[in-house]
Image: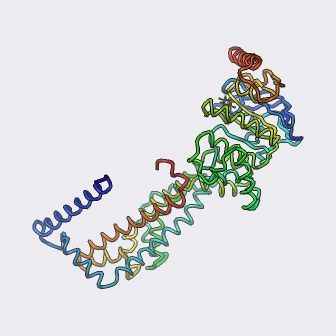
Amino acid sequence: MSGVTIRDLGKAFPKEDGTATQALAGVSLEISDEEFVCLVGPSGCGKTTLLRIIAGLETATTGGVTVDGRAVTGPDPKRGMVFQEYSLFPWRRVIDNVAFGLEMKGVAKEERRRTADHYLELVGLSQFRDAYPFELSGGMRQRVAIARALANDPDVLLMDEPFGALDAQTRNRMQKELLSLWEQTKKTIVFVTHSVDEAVYLSDRIVVLSPRPGSIREIIEIPWPRPRDRTSAEFAEVRRRVLRMIDETENAH
Amino acid sequence: MNRQTQKRLLGIAALIVAAVIWQIVAEYVVGRSFILPSVTDVAGAFVNLLGSGTLLADITVSLEHFGIGLLAAFFLGVPIGILMGWFRVADFLLDPIIEILRPIPPLAWIPFAIIWFGLTTQAAGFVIFAGAFFPILTATYSGFRDVPKVFVEAGKVLGCDTSFELIRYVALPAAVPAIASGIRIAMGVGWMCLVAAEMFGVSRYGLGYQLWHNYYLHQMPNVVVYMLILGLAGLTIDRIFRNYVDGQLLRWRAGEVA
Ligand SMILES: Nc1ncnc2c1ncn2[C@@H]1O[C@H](COP(=O)(O)OP(=O)(O)OP(=O)(O)O)[C@@H](O)[C@H]1O
Ligand SMILES: [Mg+2]
């Protein structure tokens, strides 16, 4: 029951000289409950902006977003976000980072620690519960950030290139872990990525955006079961199609 | 012999050499204790002062002046810095006032300190406050200005829905390192103001007071003793503060180069 409806969304950033950067124009998209959607597109096409509008961190210039039938007007713990850059609070231990959202909700210390421990276990970092973020590797930090978002039990999980800074091997492992988390927690996930490979591996649907102003160029359904085989012919075929599409949108400009 | 002991031995050797040179210059070149007291004069003065028993009272009174000034600077500087760093309106309102007051040398407040507070402990505290307030204020302000946007947004997405919560749980902890270094600077400035603040006889004791008092009595070896104690006490305060901050408040920064 946590579908996301994006209706005729536009976003213009005013510039100093009085003109505006049109980041998004006429984006309409229906994301159903428990769906895993990936947003791909050339750099600067507005993927982050779209995600931030869904999160409520940015307001749309035209159109709007509803989650579960209710209009998005501002940030809400019901929509979790994993940022592209490291966003863990460096002054909090891992466990207290994960428990942050619960603390804001006023959950008692004992209970929020217990819940946080549960999510730390889900991302496989129980033995680092008392470490500070600086003691963790890049991949571990993003796993903590995911645990922190999940601990709030959001309906929708928004992820902005969460694995962008990781090496290929870690990245593949994280993708596997994310899928298993998704199967266990049944969240609706909107996932931004630069990697077409990642998008094909993860998503139910890939949404290809065109360059500025970003709008939906194409939606590709991937109905295959998981785990998917990256080396299969059909995988390569879809990957090629999406890549060509991004190429075309870029050159058409 | 490892680096650490080597460093220590060389340091001690240099100190001894400096003391010997000082002694020779004072005794054979200058030859007048009033112009330049020798090491032995100073050591003798120190022993006498220890015997007279006022040193402890002097240190206590000075710490009291210093403490009043710094606590006041902290409890005013941090909240105002937070207001200005977080709320644009507060920044626009207060910035011109701050910019006019800030360049005034702290010692220029001494006449009004005496008129407002009389020759009291508070007057000395006020002068130290005038020196310590602005470093704390500006450090807090820029600490808040520099809080990474992603922390604030993470806080919002995770359920901080008031400015108070964002300040309390996100911005303030993020700004602690900046505030701590502001306090350190403030302590240095405050300690410098101490000597001048005690110059006017706000008390019968105090390291700064005794420095002036002995100067009027032409007891220059005593003056040197008080100078050295002022330096050592300042150093000790700074060390204690830094150890506390690094050990307690900033353990989470252990991985970074300071
Ligand atoms: N706060 C802002 N102020 C002004 N312009 C902005 C702002 N945020 C984004 N933009 C502009 O909007 C456009 C889309 O930016 P956005 O960050 O959404 O792109 P993106 O698709 O996430 O790019 P990338 O793949 O490189 O991360 C860009 O042209 C950018 O310059
Ligand atoms: Mg982006």
Q: Give the quarter of the image for residue A234.
A: top right
A246 shown above or below A82: above
Q: Left or right: A245 with respect to B247? A: right
Dividing the image into 4 quarters, which one contains the C terminus of chain A?
top right
Q: Identify the residue at image location x=13%, y=67%.
A: B30
Camera-nearest residue between B181 and A94: A94
Provide residue A134's location: percent of width, then percent of height.
56, 47
B233 shown above or below B99: below
Report if residue A127 is visible in the image.
yes
Q: Left or right: B134 with respect to B196? A: right
Provide residue B257's location: percent of width, then percent of height.
47, 47
Q: Which residue, as the protein is rendered here, is positioned at the far left?
A: B28
Q: Disc count in the image? A: 0
Camera-nearest residue between B80 and B24: B24
Q: Identify the residue at image location x=35%, y=76%.
A: B209
A167 shown above or below B146: above
